[in-house]
Image (spheres, rainbow, N blue to C red):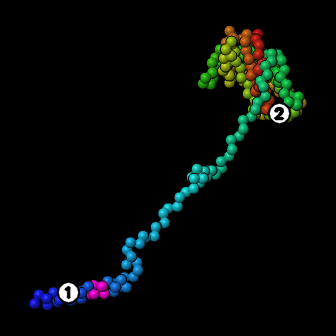
Amino acid sequence: MFDRISRSAMALIAAAAVLLILVVVVVGQIAGPDDVNPSAAPAPSAGPSATPLSSAASPTPSVGATATDKPIKRPAVKTLGIGATAKFNRGTTARLVKITRVNGKAVLPGEIAGPAIAVQVSVYAGERVSFDQTVVNAYSGARDTPAIQLSTGTKPLTGSLARSRTTTGTYVFAVPDKDLDDVTIEFDFALQEPVTLFTGAVR
């Protein structure tokens, strides 16, 4: 009896194994090769493109950017006596015609009333010249203290001057009486010309 049962059980097991094999084969055919091989690595996704170092390190220049202009190299400063004549290009000259002691008036903010000097500068044009860049300053005393320019009485050189013509400008500066023995008048005619320092005593 037990022998019959064992044989019946073995037959059932064998039948079940054959059925399982058939099920696996059918499922594999339906699912396709991709599902049968689940261990296959998926294709890598495309990541963000890397920026080249040269592009990252080289920003685009802004529109309208220009190179820095080179500084103008000025001629050496010339120092002359109070009564000397400064010579410039093409026969143009400048000199201090007169320096007069006056009583300065304070009108604008920053001006100081009191002892002052009125400096008359005469310019002869060897060619047509412009006074657009012309600046006149004054210094006094052992420390060359900058003198304050006063508006009252000052009539600066302006505009232009034709060839072979002469014109005069007047500049008033507040200068203490104690510094009159050591006065410097700075005449800066134009960028391409040397700055001229007229130095001496004012009587």
Q: Quadrant of residue 200?
A: top right
The stretch drawn in magenta includes residue 88: no
Which amino acid lies under the numbered mark 1 shown in the image of this protein?
Met
Horizontal and vertical percent for residue 32? 39, 82
> Relative to 34, is 124 above or below?
above
SS state under label 2: strand
Mark 1 Cα shell of 10 Å, populated few (<14), some (14-19), many (≥20): few
Vertical comparison of 74 with 55: above or below: above
Q: Quadrant of residue 5?
A: bottom left
Q: Is residue 116 visible?
A: no
Q: Residue at x 85, y 25 (%)?
A: 87
Element under label 1? helix
Give the position of the N terminus as an image quadrant: bottom left
How far apart in space, not on screen, are marks 1 and 2 (Cα)? 128 Å
Q: Position of residue 21 (x, y in %)?
A: 30, 85
Q: Which residues are magenta?
A: 18-22
Mark 2 — residue? 129
Given residues 55 and 126, the one toward you in this image is: 55
At 40% across and 78% down in the image, what residue appears? 34
Pick the residue in front: 70 or 2.
2
Say what amino acid the circle numbered 2 marks: Val
Q: Which mark is residue 10?
A: 1
Find residue 98 and report its image quarter: top right
Q: Nearer the viewer, residue 179 or 45?
A: 45
Q: Which quadrant is the C terminus positioned in? A: top right
Q: Residue 26, can we see it?
A: yes
